[in-house]
Structure formats: C-alpha cells, structure tokens
Image: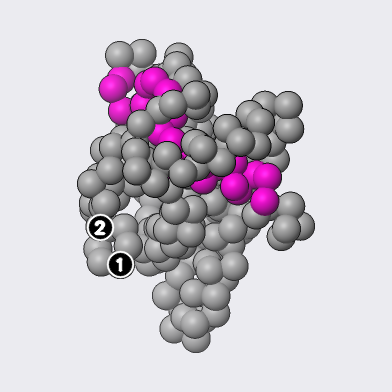
Amino acid sequence: YGGGGGGIDNIHASTADHSMHKRSMHNSDEWPLLLYVHGVCESAETWGVQTLVQYCAKHCWRLIVLELAGHGLSENKAALGRATCPNFDDLVNHVVEFAEQMSGKFSRSRGFAMCGCSLGGALVSFAVQGILATRRDKTEQHEHPYFYGIALLAPSLGVNPGAIPPSPVVTALKALSFFLPSHGVLTPIEHPTYACPPNSRRNFSGRWPLSTSSMLLDLTSNRVPNDV
C-alpha cells in the first residue's frame, strides 16, 4: 500500500486478511481493524506481528501493519539510510494519517483499535490526540468506524539512566548525528532474531543510526517526562 498524499507517500502498510484463508469471508468488510505500528528497526515480518496475524484470523479481525519510513518496504522521503528516523513528530503524523486512511478505506468496519510496540507504542500514544481531532472533524459525515482505543506493548516511554553514556559523549554524538544521520557510532546493535520468516531482509541489522538513537534518547529522557 502506498499512502495517497500527505506525509506518507511511499509508506507501506501490510494487511493480514490474506492469512485468513480458512475462515469465512462473509461480511469481512465489517470486521474490526487492528492497526499496528512496529518498533525501531523492525517491519511487518516479525514473530510478534505473525502472532497477531494468527490471533486476528481466529477472532475475525483485519490486521494492518504500518511500516515506518525507512523500515521494511517503506522508503525514506529524505533519502536517508534504513531505519533512520530523526524526526519523531513526522512519524507521529504518519501514524495519524495511517489511522485516517485505513479507517476511511474500510469504512464499513465495526471499529478499529491502534496498537504499537516499542517505538510504535510511543508513536501511537502521541498520535491519539491527532486521531481524535481528525475524527471530531468528520463526526457528522459518518465516514469512519468506531475508535475502540489503543494498546501499548512495551512502549518506549522511559530509559535506564545507567544505559546513557556520559553527557560529553551524548553531546558529541548528537552533533555528529546531524552530519552522519545514517551512521552507527557507539549505538545499540540490532540483531533481528525476531524475523519471521527467519531469512527476511525487511528488518534492520547492525548498529542503530545515530539520528534514530538521538531521537529515541530525547523522547525517553526529555519529551516523555516533560509531558507526564
């Protein structure tokens, strides 16, 4: 799926209703939607997502997964490297547009819920205000299904202070991230052992990009505490 307009052009969404081949498709247009946002470096091809596929198939829900910019099959609009996402607010806007477009596309659905894991959980929690505002603007038009709410799976809303390098190192790495946003220097190493299928290449492997690490550190150590 390619987003039609706005900020999510070339952003991919995978729908899992094709995995429900053993279940009746009668009235499938009315199935509720589970709109899922993955974590940093991940994609739609993880064990977590595939577990949700099985659950949704069993309970007649339609699962749709947003692959964030630079992740999975989604392109990075700024021509940055894979898993490079320096701007948290841009990603939040993508999630809001994702919810609006999918709930509009499946307008006969009984309702939809948002779910996010890790970075996806943080994005969903910050996107709620925009989702509700969009729905208020269209309430009288009866265009969108009912919004059930959100489910957060280990959201990135905090950080262990002991895991943060000394302040001079953080300052130097943040400065470096402006010049080399896609490079990994002293950042966490991602091993996609959660890939499903195991040979999937849609999940990022290696050191996190500097700009992504900087964005997550700012989110968990500054933005979330200031908003709480």
Quick one: SS at disc 2?
loop
Mark number displayed over residue 49: none
Marks 1,2: beta carbons within 8 A: yes
> Position of 160 compared to 218: left or right?
right
| Residue sitting farthest toward the bottom | 140
* Residue toward you, 196 or 227: 227
Q: Which residue is mark 2?
A: 9
Residue 119 colored magenta?
no
> Position of 1 compared to 214: left or right?
left
* Residue 10: image location, x then y, percent: 23, 51
Q: Residues within 10 Å of mark 2 (few under 14, many from 20)?
A: some
Quick one: SS at disc 1?
loop
Quadrant of the rendered image containing residue 63:
top left
Whether residue 119 appears in this view of the structure is: no
Q: Which residue is mark 1?
A: 6
What colour-coding does the image apply?
one colour
* Residue 194: image location, x then y, percent: 46, 19
Q: Disc 1 residue type?
A: Gly
Point 52% across, 67% down: residue: 131
- Between marks 1 and 2, how big is the CA–CA gap? 7 Å
Query: Does 127 appear above or below 80?
Result: below
Q: Disc 2 residue type?
A: Asp
Question: What span is colored magenta in the figure?
Answer: 200-222
* Residue 191: image location, x then y, percent: 45, 16
Quadrant of the rendered image containing residue 17:
top left
Whether residue 202 appears in this view of the structure is: yes
* Residue toward you, 142 or 11: 11
Point 40% across, 63% down: residue: 97
Point 30% across, 14% down: residue: 199
